[in-house]
Amino acid sequence: MRDIISTPLIVGTLGIIIAGIFGSFVYYQKLNSAVGGISHASLAGIGLGYLLFSLPMYGAYLLAPFLGLLLGYIAQKHKQHHDALISLIWAGGMSLGILLLYLSPGYTAGLQSYLFGNILFTSTMDIWILGGLALLSLVFLGSFRKVLIILSYDPEFARIQKIPYKLVYYCFMVLIAFVIVALTKIIGIVLILAIFSLPTLASINIRRTLAGIVWSNIIIGIIAIWGGIIGAYYLDIPSSPLIVGILIILYGVSLVLKKR
């Protein structure tokens, strides 16, 4: 048991720490639809990676920065109808990914593992990737925390003060895109948005400060990730439904605590 799930637990913990840190900024900047678009459109990268290299995740990582920049641009520049444009990329990326997978020589029907996650897909390489992303995210947050806070609460102030918010914003989106791809093996493409949104929704019910929300995000996420992965191992089911189910329960608990 230890050998099978230790790697997924480490990968999931590293990923949820990053998602917990950035989840509040995603929420306050109204980027949830962009996160969903990146996760679903990344299937195109998986399909391309499988077709060209027989290494599906390589294609997803190659496509990740382009998706982060593109959907970040749409969310910034087309605010009145960005949801419709993101939906186009969302559906188009998934459709292209499915087509490329089925065109790939030797492809066997394993699409469900990418859509809903599979703990057996994780490897030591994923630990190194997410460890590097976690370190990079902490350095990024330490360097640009004030800019991210301003972008979350008063983006117009950043423009007036000539703060280099665009560079910070797009670096932020690229980092998120890489984290989304890295978490695909655990939570799956379909439910990845829950990792970024549900902990924050629960945290804002029980915490008032941004620092409190971030720490609460991380704690809630770790409970869900560990519970989902360990439960999936013993019940022999995909980990993502359990992870999301635990997150929903914790959100319900936060509503009860809020009323008190």
Image (cartoon, rainbow, N blue to C red):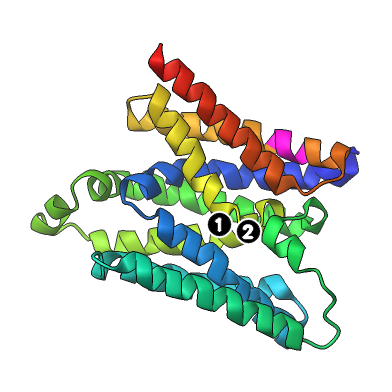
- Please name the predominant secondary structure of the magenta segment in the image: helix
Which label number is shown at residue 179? 1
Residue 131 at x, y percent in the picture: 62, 50
User: Could you tell me the amino acid type at mark 2?
Assistant: Ala
Residue 166 shown left or right of residue 68 in the figure: left
Picture quadrant of residue 70: bottom left
Q: Which residue is mark 2?
A: 182
Q: Residue at x 55, y 41 (%)?
A: 17
Q: Are marks 2 and 1 in contact (CB under 8 Å)?
A: yes
CA neighbours of label 1 inside 10 A, class few (<14), some (14 to 19), many (20+):
many
Q: Residue at x 25, y 50 (%)?
A: 151
- Magenta span of residues: 226-230
Mark pair 2, 1: CA separation: 5 Å
Give percent across and percent down for residue 179.
55, 57
For this view, does 118 lie left or right of residue 217?
A: right
Secondary structure category for the residue under label 1: helix
Amino acid type assigned to the residue bearing label 1 in the image: Val
SS for dot 2: helix
Q: Which mark is residue 112?
A: none
Query: Which corner quadrant holds the C terminus?
Result: top left
The quarter of the picture where residue 255 lies is: top left
Q: Is residue 99 visible?
A: yes
Q: Residue at the left extreme?
A: 160
Q: Can you give x and y, in whole percent of width and height, for residue 149 in the image? A: 28, 44
Q: Is residue 228 magenta?
A: yes
Quadrant location of the N terminus? top right
Whether 205 is drawn above or below 13: the answer is above
Mark 2 Cα-neighbour bin, 10 Å: few <14, some 14–19, many ≥20: many
> Considering depth in this image, is 139 or 219 the residue closer to the camera?
219
Residue 100 in the image: above or below residue 206 = below
Residue 41 at x, y percent in the picture: 54, 71
Q: Is residue 69 visible?
A: no
